[in-house]
Amino acid sequence: MGGQQHPKQPSLTSPETTKNNRHNVPKSTLMIVLTGATGVIGKHILRNLVNRGHRVRCMLRPGRSQEGLPDYGELVSWQEASLFDPSDLENLLNGAEKVIHSAGFVSFLRSDRDNLFKTNVEGTANLVNACLDAGIKKLVHLSSIAALGSGKKSGTVDEKAKWEEDNASAYAHSKRLAEQEVWRAEAEGLSVAVVNPSVVLTNEHGDRSSAELNNRMLAKKSIYPKGDMNYVDVRDVAEIVSQLVESDISGERFVLSAGKTSFSELRQLFVKFSGLQKPKNIELGSGLMGTGAMLANIAAVLRGKTAPYAIGSIKNIGKCPLYDSSKVSNALGVRFRGLDESLSWICESLQRGSETVSKKSPAQR
């Protein structure tokens, strides 16, 4: 078990905790600005940067409470800023040398289309313009395999994939256009690197992007599509982003994917590592999923609301090629974690988290 994986390369190093690490690693004089530091992926990038001794200035959405934010001591500061306020961005980048842009919006609902393009495209354009004005030395941009836009349903896809319009989601379009803003900035003199991760496996519950997968796969009754998905461990994404921001690599994009597995196998492994008792599994084919989405659209329209689902995108769930990460493996000498290792870590982390919450009094929760 464990899915179709890429050949092994020398192992990535990614410390699991940062407790006392800030006292054990040399402090870097480099100031890195990180957007999306409270996000599913961004928080792991932040932890990795701190473990490497970097000073990090994290962008915080205006009005966002700082309660519950991780305390990394003097290595990390939090600064309110909006991607849509030029003066905010100017202040955010003041004195910084490099930027990691991990902030973004993920949704496949039609009602979120405008927000997708505003956040992912306009927000990225504003940030790269601010980077150019501030004389930033390097930008590492977190994109997605969706931006590759390959219409292939099998075979292998890498960074050279040609964009195809057919059935591309609004999310895919927004990530592609965001990348174009980054490449424009490169043409204007900014050193850039882009990463395109597949489905990111992370140790969180919740309704935000990758974390939602855990909810579905750990449910007593799990409903999932028939077909496959590509995956990558969030710790590997964080490590690679950190290596790229430190490196002299510029003008390159990198697919980040550890391998490919079926949703059915993914469910079996989640059940195995979580110890879930008497699970119920419901696997839906693309035709049934498309019909369900169509009925939901009709019901929404009859209520005077926007049809929520793009039928073409729904029907294509589970139909995917194998995304090839050999370029980043060769460039950085990395080995991606296997599926068993990732899911074991996820289930153990979530179990520890639930035990911690259950021990708290209602007032502490």
Image (cartoon, rainbow, N blue to C red):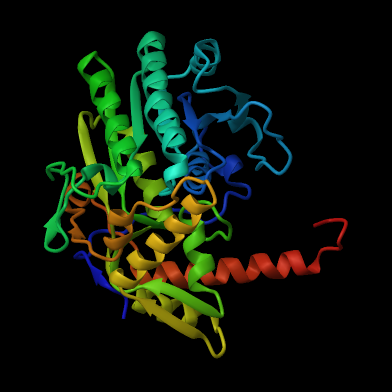
Residue 137 left/right relative to 24:
left
- What residue lies at 19% left-to-right and 65% top-to-bottom? 7
Q: Quadrant of the N terminus?
A: bottom left
In the displayed structure, 70 sits above or below 138; it is below
Q: Nearer the viewer, residue 266 or 79?
A: 266
In the displayed structure, 82 sits above or below 71; it is above
Q: Quadrant of the C terminus?
A: bottom right
- Residue 101 in view in this figure: no
Residue 81: image quadrant is top right
Residue 358 left/right relative to 106:
right
Residue 218 left/right relative to 161:
right
- What residue lies at 54% left-to-right and 10% top-to-bottom? 87
Residue 165: image quadrant is top left
- What residue lies at 73% left-to-right and 65% top-to-bottom? 356
List x then y, in percent, for residue 319: 23, 64
List x then y, in percent, for residue 67: 74, 39
Q: Nearer the viewer, residue 293 or 322?
A: 293
- What residue lies at 23% left-to-right and 32% top-to-bottom? 249
Q: Nearer the viewer, residue 43 or 124?
A: 124
List x then y, in percent, for residue 16: 52, 56
